[in-house]
Image: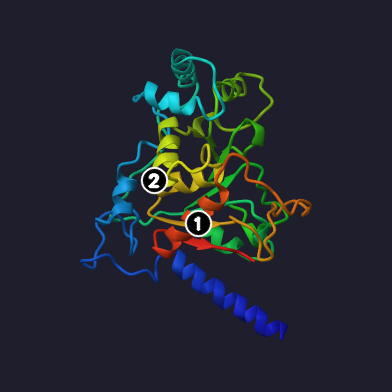
Amino acid sequence: MLSRMRKSRAFILLLSSLTTLGLVLPLLPGGRNTHCACPRCLTEGTDEFSQVLRTAPKPFLLKSSKTTEEDFNWWKQVQREKKTFSVFTTKIDELFQIFPPSPNLVGPSPDRCRTCAVVGNSGNLRGSHYGHLIDSHDIVIRMNRGVTTGYEVDVGSKTTHHVMYPESAKMLVNTTHLVFIPFKIKDLQWLQKNFVPGAKWRANKDLVMILNPAFMRYVHETLLQKRGRYPSTGFLSVAFSMQMCDQVSVFGFGADSHGNWYHYFETLRNRRLKTGPHAGTHEYNVILQLHDEAKLQFFQGF
């Protein structure tokens, strides 16, 4: 029986791999994609969702483009920021004296199929054996306090981008991009302080990417229809991955198969874990809907 269970799991993961790589998704009308080399590309097509993706603001701050005061006024309500727009713009200018003026993003190409794995921290990853599948993606995005050591079989070992904010920060290896989500000006000050000479916190300053407040607003108002006070780190990661990659796979979101909410690297203690100011259930349902519409692949774990 154990042998049959192992063969069944291997077969499921093989099918999952083929689906993730786009090998079982249908071609768009016309039989050939012009945006990327995948059988199906996120931004190609005339449907409403593809158009929504194409009209999104730049996901990361650029030195060459400034945040508008209107977007700042939305952003300042996220954690009830009291400082002014001029303080914000001054701080951004100071940060661009430390970090690259623009993130290293390459647009879609008909000669390339770029895949993203967005890896949440749900306990449903335990026993999933998704590790090899996750690591097979070109870009692997992890978040907050997610770890890999000791959990490689289920969550993989590869991390190209790590998403965090000060309260969830962890040190990064020199080859991993820091995707920083600021929720207030104090967060920007924290980022600046931790990249001065002699700072003990560690990450590669040349691989820092700062999420654009305008993009955060777009996700909240357009993708989530203003549900919750602001989007979660996880859903923001799903949203910007759809701007970076031609195909997106999502792992480690939601409860486990018994309905418990917890992190795979922690012992289950709180069976009533709350999602704070985020519309967690709605975000989860949006991901499910995108999966049903073949916009992304959602692996629900065990």
Asked if one can make out residue 45 in the rendered structure from this viewpoint, the answer is: yes
Q: Position of residue 297 (x, y in %)?
A: 47, 62
In the picture, measured across the screen, residue 194 lies left or right of residue 215, that is: right
Mark 1 vs mark 2, foreground winner is: 1
- Give the percent coordinates (x, y) of residue 292: 43, 64
Q: Which residue is mark 2?
A: 243
- Pick the residue in front: 100 or 89: 89
In the image, taking residue 144 as reference, residue 46 lies left or right, namely left
Q: Earlier in the sequence, mark 1 or mark 2?
A: 2
Which dot marks residue 271? none
Mark 2, other Cα within 10 Å: few <14 / some 14–19 / many ≥20: many
Mark 2 residue type: Gln
| Amino acid type of the residue that numbered disc 1 sits on in the rendered structure | Asn
Task: State the image coordinates of residue 272 (x, y, percent, origin top left).
Answer: 71, 51
For the residues labelled 1 and 2, the Cα–Cα distance comes to 20 Å
Q: Which residue is mark 1?
A: 285
Decide if residue 43 is in sight here: no
The colouring scheme, among rainbow, by chain, secondary structure or one colour, is rainbow
